[in-house]
């Protein structure tokens, strides 16, 4: 399987969505258009070729339903290889680089994790995420302290924004951990 197929966030989002229920290309477009997942892609020029690549790679299987109707549709399901790839992605450790460069991907992983890996692995993931988030803030604080000594206050304001955003992620992770541990 080509490396680019594995690393595409659109690919992983698509596999995650199809893991929840069989879907058509139209179903995927609708999710990408009408939910916060819009930034992954709602373009038919991206979704349909991605589905074709995934099917050619053996990660999903499409079956045409309603061939005898005016509107036949191709419904995709996850294959064993597709589920295995999805699980491998979900089980990856959270790294500092993920926290710095791929925060949205981390939330996307969480979205699919509970139904695929279960509550305990999801809790472990969230605790690992929380640890990485907390460990990154001190370096941002150092940058803020340095930025405050420059002539322009805008650098400091931008870094303050970054710190606030990480603190939001921390509050969210703590909240979800607390809620999951209540059960």
Image (spheres, rainbow, N blue to C red):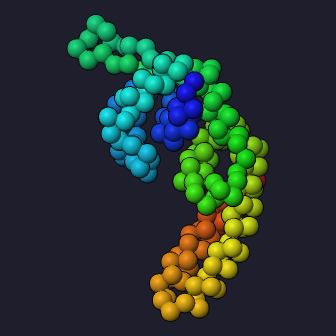
Q: How many marks?
A: 0
How far across and how far down the image is residue 134, in percent?
72, 67
Residue 143 lies left or right of residue 66; in this view the side is right
Placement of 173 over or under 29, stated as above or below: below
Quadrant in which the N terminus appears: top right
Instruction: Examine the rendering and report whether any part of residue 169 can be seen.
Output: yes
Question: Residue 28 is drawn in which quadrant?
Answer: top left
Residue at horizontal 30 percent and vertical 15 percent from the top: 72
Residue at horizontal 50 percent and vertical 92 percent from the top: 151
Residue in the foreground of this view, choosing between 163 and 35: 163
How far across and how far down the image is residue 89, in percent?
64, 38
Placement of 96 over or under 150, stated as above or below: above
Instruction: Examine the rendering and report whether any part of residue 15 can be seen.
Output: no
Q: Which residue extends farthest left?
A: 70
Question: Residue 81 is drawn in which quadrant?
Answer: top right
How far across and how far down the image is residue 172, in percent?
62, 62
Residue in the foreground of this view, choosing between 165 and 121: 165
Residue at horizontal 71 percent and vertical 75 percent from the top: 138
How far across and how far down the image is residue 122, in percent?
71, 46
Residue at horizontal 51 percent and vertical 39 percent from the top: 8
Placement of 110 over or under 115, stated as above or below: below
Q: Which residue extends farthest top?
A: 68
Placement of 113 over or under 156, stated as above or below: above
Residue 94 lies left or right of residue 47; in this view the side is right
Q: Which residue extends farthest front?
A: 150
């Amino acid at each position: 399987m080509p490396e680019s197929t594995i690393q595409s966030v659109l690919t992983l989002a698509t596999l995650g969505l199809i893991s929840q229920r069989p879907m058509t290309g139209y179903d995927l477009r609708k999710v990408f258009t009408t939910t916060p997942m819009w930034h992954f892609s709602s373009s038919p020029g991206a979704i349909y070729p991605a589905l074709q690549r995934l099917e050619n790679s053996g990660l999903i299987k499409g079956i045409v339903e309603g061939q005898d109707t005016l509107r036949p549709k191709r419904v995709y399901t996850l294959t064993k290889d597709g589920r295995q790839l999805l699980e491998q992605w979900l089980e990856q450790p959270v790294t500092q680089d993920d926290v710095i460069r791929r925060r949205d991907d981390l939330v996307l992983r969480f979205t699919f994790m509970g139904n695929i890996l279960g509550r305990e692995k999801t809790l472990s993931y969230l605790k690992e995420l929380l640890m990485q988030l907390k460990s990154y803030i001190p370096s941002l604080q150092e940058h803020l302290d340095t930025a405050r000594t420059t002539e322009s206050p805008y650098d400091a304001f931008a870094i303050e924004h970054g710190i606030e955003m990480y603190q939001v992620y921390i509050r969210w992770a703590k909240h979800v951990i607390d809620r999951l541990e209540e059960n």
